[in-house]
Amino acid sequence: MIKPDSWIARMAKEAKMIEPFAATQVKEGVISYGVSSYGYDMRISDEFRVFSPDGMSEIDPKKFNPAIFKDVKAKGFLLLGPHSYALGKSVEYFRIPRNVVTACFGKSTYARCGVVVNVTPFEPEWEGYVTISISNTSSLPVKIYCNEGIAQVLFFESDEACNISYADRKGKYQSQNDITHAKI
């Protein structure tokens, strides 16, 4: 079941599910973030790893070379080049309860500019800052605004807790504090 805004606010307070937490939707003059009807619009921080393919012929997820990215600390926004991508980090730290899983979708404001945001589900008992993949599919540079909304997280609660959680499996992306590259 998708959970309404009141459940999200309660879980953010009781279980520290989202920190920092915006209990209302902030939208005046910014790309909205905070509580939405059945989810939470998370923000993108000012930390990015921008794809820089100099001298590279391929990207291999089994032998990932972090040298294909350059670290960028943005001032207000990141200007993402045409047909390029970057990894970013959420402002919020998430702690997902054992009986909850999420799905995440990019904000429509960015989608209408040719930006595709990819975030994998947050599994039961996963926690950390979210590594966010941002792709510019347009032929022009696009501004990605720091500390504003980037994607909406929807929360699905089960009637039962899962048998084996992400924490139980000692998932490789557990408790990530930085932008995290592909791992095997």
Image (cartoon, rainbow, N blue to C red):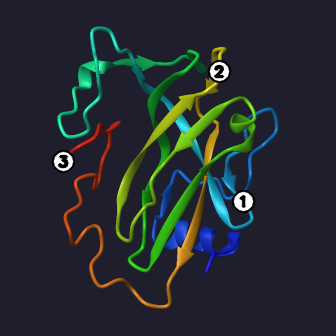
Query: Is the residue marked by circle 2 packed among few (<14), some (14-19), or many (20+) residues within 10 Å?
Result: some
Which SS class for mark 3?
loop
Q: Name the residue under label 1.
A: 36
The amino acid type found where label 2 is placed reads Lys
Q: Select label 2 or label 3 by which is in front.
A: 3
Q: Which of 12 and 110 is in front in this view?
A: 110
The amino acid type found where label 3 is placed reads Ile
Q: Please name the residue shown 44% across and 57% down the image.
A: 94
Instruction: Identify the residue at the far front of this view.
Output: 57
Circles 1 and 3: CB atoms closer than 8 Å: no
The amino acid type found where label 1 is placed reads Ser
146 above or below 172?
above
Q: Nearer the viewer, residue 101 or 112?
A: 112
Q: In which quarter of the image is residue 65?
A: top left
Instruction: Identify the residue at the far bottom of this view.
Output: 159
| Disc 2 to disc 3, C-alpha distance | 32 Å
Which SS class for mark 2?
strand
Q: Name the residue under label 3.
A: 184
Q: Please name the residue shown 52% across and 50% down the image.
A: 20
Q: Mark 2 points at which residue?
A: 143
Quadrant in which the N terminus is drawn:
bottom right
